[in-house]
Image (tube, rainbow, N blue to C red):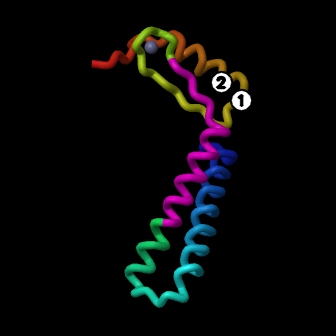
Amino acid sequence: MKSNQYLPRAVSLGAGAVIATTAASSLAPYALPGHLLATCVMSAGASGMWLANYAIDRVTVRSLRCTAAECTLTVRLRGTDAAESRRWQEAVADHPQHRLPH
Ligand SMILES: [Zn+2]
């Protein structure tokens, strides 16, 4: 994994931590049992992390699909240079075995 590919994961992890902390501080005055507080905080944090990761992927990931009818091959690229992206484009356009849905 390239070093620039760690940044989106770190950002989504940070967003999840911020949301979990916010949820914990919002629920603290209610004196919930520890296991219930932990469940709420972890689920809010995981949801925030997933949402941030999804949003980052929508912006930074490029998908290449095979153009053959009914072929489901898809390649997802992030942080690739022009030469590597071109190689993947050629590989997706001309691969020996098309994935056909059954
Ligand atoms: Zn194909």
Magenta segment boundaries in residue numbering: 44-65
The residue tagged 1 is: 81
Q: Which mark is residue 85?
A: 2
Q: Observer-nearest residue: 31 or 10?
A: 31
**Who's the residue at 52% across and 81% down the image?**
27
The amino acid at mark 2 is Ser
Task: Kindly identify the residue that appears in the image at 57 percent across and 79 percent down.
Answer: 26
Q: Which label belongs to residue 5?
A: none
Q: Residue at x 67, y 32 (%)?
A: 80
Q: Name the amino acid type tagged 1.
A: Asp
- The answer to if 33 sits in the magenta stretch is no
Residue 77 point in image, percent of width and height: 60, 32
Query: In the figure, residue 49 lies in which quadrant?
Result: bottom right
| Structural distance between the alpha carbons of marks 2 and 1 | 6 Å
Whether residue 31 sits left or right of residue 59 in the image: it is left
Residue 71 is situated, as x and y percent measured from the top left of the image, at 41, 15
Count of labels in the image: 2
Q: Please say if 85 is above or below 32.
A: above
Side of 46 where 79 appears, left or right: right
Can you give x and y, in whole percent of width and height, for residue 74 in the image? 49, 25
Q: Quadrant of the C terminus?
A: top left
Question: Pointer 2: residues within 10 angstroms few (<14), some, or many (20+)?
Answer: some
Quadrant showing the N terminus: top right
